[in-house]
């Protein structure tokens, strides 16, 4: 094989690698957008009932205080996802909750005012009728 043929072969290989990388990047970007959309939909559809209405939560009407995104799309061609959306919210009674998305069942937890104050810092607001 002559030197010119080796150079052309190397260029062809690099072009192929670039095309595969670009394709993989686009798939991962699309997969991440789908994971984000799914997580936001999980939150919006969330409905937690409780005997005490202060501890009830409806995702679509809760006030979002903070959102955090971690993880992303993993694997060749974006086949895996470890994306998690964490949303800290306040209901109409001033009670705080943390929501974490999941591909299976989302996690929701009521936060004490002390925990909410520590986690949210300056974003924390004392409820008007709170003993916090």
Image (tube, rainbow, N blue to C red):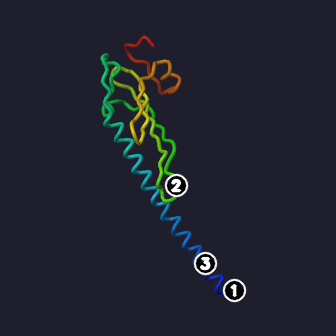
- The correct choice, above or below, for 91 with respect to 42 in the image is above
Q: Residue at x 34, y 30 (%)?
A: 62
Disc 2 element: loop
Disc 3 element: helix
- The correct choice, above or below, for 33 with respect to 116 in the image is below
Could you say where residue 66 lies in the image, as x and y percent from the top left?
45, 33
How crowded pointer 3 is (Cα within 10 Å; few <14, some 14-19, many 20+) is rated as few
How many marks on residues? 3
Q: CA distance from mark 1 to mark 2?
A: 36 Å
Q: Quadrant of the C terminus?
A: top left
Residue 75 got which mark?
2
Q: Residue at x 53, y 23 (%)?
A: 118
Whichever of labels 1 and 2 marks the residue nearer the N terminus, that label is 1
Q: Quadrant of the N terminus?
A: bottom right
Q: CA distance from mark 3 to mark 1?
A: 12 Å
Location of mark 3 (residue): 11
Side (left or right) of 50 relative to 114: left
How crowded pointer 2 is (Cα within 10 Å; few <14, some 14-19, many 20+) is rated as few
Residue 3 got which mark?
1
Whichever of labels 3 and 1 marks the residue nearer the N terminus, that label is 1
Side (left or right) of 74 relative to 109: right
């Amino acid at each position: 094989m002559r030197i010119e043929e080796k150079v052309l072969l190397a260029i062809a290989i690099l072009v192929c690698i670039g095309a595969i990388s670009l394709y993989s990047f686009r798939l991962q970007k699309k997969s991440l957008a789908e994971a984000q959309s799914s997580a936001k939909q999980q939150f919006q559809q969330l409905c937690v009932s409780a005997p005490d209405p202060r501890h009830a939560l409806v995702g679509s009407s809760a006030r979002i205080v903070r959102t955090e995104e971690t993880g992303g799309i993993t694997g060749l061609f974006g086949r895996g996802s470890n994306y998690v959306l964490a949303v800290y919210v306040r209901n109409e009674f001033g009670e705080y909750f943390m929501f974490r998305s999941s591909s299976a069942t989302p996690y929701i937890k009521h936060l004490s005012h002390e925990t909410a104050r520590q986690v949210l810092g300056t974003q924390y607001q004392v409820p008007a009728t709170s003993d916090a």
